[in-house]
Image (cartoon, rainbow, N blue to C red):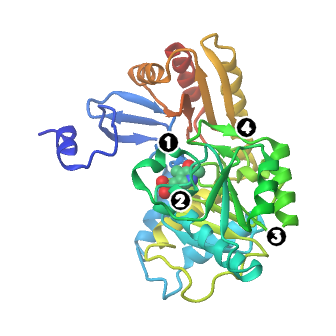
Amino acid sequence: MDIKSIDKEYIIGTYKRFPIEIVRGKGSLVYDENGKEYIDMGSGIGVTSFGIADDEWKKAICCQLDKVQHMSNLFYTEPCAMLAKLLCEKTGMKKVFFSNSGAEANECAIKAARKYSEETNGKDAYLIVTLENSFHGRTVTTLAATGQEHYHELFNPLTDGFAHIKAGDIDALRKMCNEKKIAAVMIECIQGEGGVIPLEKSFVKELRQFTEENNILLIVDEVQTGNGRSGELYSYMNYGVEPDIVTTAKGLAGGLPIGAVLFNEKTQNVFGYGDHGSTFGGNPVSCAAALSVLNRIDSDLLNGVKLKSEYIFNKLSECPEVESVDGMGLMIGIKTKKPVSEVLEKCIENGVLCLTAKDRLRLLPALNISDDVLKKAVDIIIESC
Ligand SMILES: *Cc1c(COP(=O)(O)O)cnc(C)c1O
């Protein structure tokens, strides 16, 4: 039996895979079982920040593997401490909790918001407000946070204590606040799974002001938008606001599992001994990988992200088969005239791996994709439209 048949027989059917087995890659190029080359414009859903098998990234991991691959959180390890320090230095946040995934980072943020709010606003102040069309993860609680009904249907009852408002509708939040005690508002500045849709700057600013005035925490989910993806280190930095809690994951360790929750001055002391934990959280190999990724996201790299972004926006906006281009940095959603599934299939046939989000073609290339490879990919995408 070949790999595809074995996978089909033994892996439970949650993923609709393309009929391609990826066997290796380098940078933004990957190769299938027949040696066919593809340009990777999806980065494993925004994970491989510096592409596949990047040399500097590999070196950081191998170096740590020779020292210690895992220790319980009952002991100190250097990569964990140094990564937390670097995250705080680069953001101005004060403390970090490490998990293994985006959903777990959001779970931690939700627990923190509930505890903080109960202590400052009383026992009934647990409501967490998120946006319609949002995505915050697949656990029973982060599904409740996710503002898309179709993810909920099969798994009710979900965790209690969540409500959703329309993006842009600050009045809905005001009204809700008059009726119920709200612990936190959680947003993605650019809705990723929802179709790569950036929030309005004015709305995010109003949200920050309103939450501050009403002692409501602002949580920004930077799982997909974070770590250079938007052209700034974190997407909220494009909006001129400072959240109370930031969650991130996907691209942080460049391809190893990690999640991180960042707490500001106000929320930094919410957890004490035993309040939260994770066996693998802060794993030294994942943290060493993340340190190497984060150290490379400097102003030069971010400028490169912005220039590459401009190139994609300009080229695709000119294409008559494209209705609109949305997003920020190297997180781009393209509304095509043809059905997106057809365009995606053509792209893959022509050697470019893309993603979709709702009815959009979604691009999340490596942050350091070279200009000539990017140009080739964009030409093929336009042709496929
Ligand atoms: C992917 C994603 C998550 C979930 O992350 P996992 O690592 O798959 O648990 C949560 N929030 C956002 C915005 C995401 O894009």
The answer to whether one can see residue 379 in this image is yes
The answer to which image quadrant residue 2 occupies is top left
Give left or right: position of 279 versus 367. left
Is the residue marked 2 within 8 Å of ligand 1, measured from its CB? yes
Q: Which mark is residue 306?
A: 4
Question: Badge 2 local density, few (<14 within 10 Å), some, or many (20+)?
Answer: many
Q: Which mark is residue 218?
A: none
Q: Report x, y in % for residue 267.
A: 73, 75
> Considering depth in this image, is 56 or 73 the residue closer to the camera?
73
Q: Which mark is residue 142?
A: 2
Front of the two marks 4 and 2? 2
Name which residue type carries label 2.
Thr
Front of the two marks 3 and 1? 3
Of pointers 3 and 1, the one earlier in the residue sequence: 1
Q: Report x, y in % for residue 70.
A: 41, 76
Residue holding disc 3: 215
Name which residue type carries label 1.
Ser
Q: Residue at x 85, y 51 (%)?
A: 205
The reply to whether discs 3 and 1 touch (Cβ–Cβ < 8 Å) is: no
Give left or right: position of 60 versus 6. right
Residue holding disc 1: 43
Q: Residue furthest front?
A: 179
Q: Secondary structure at mark 2?
A: helix
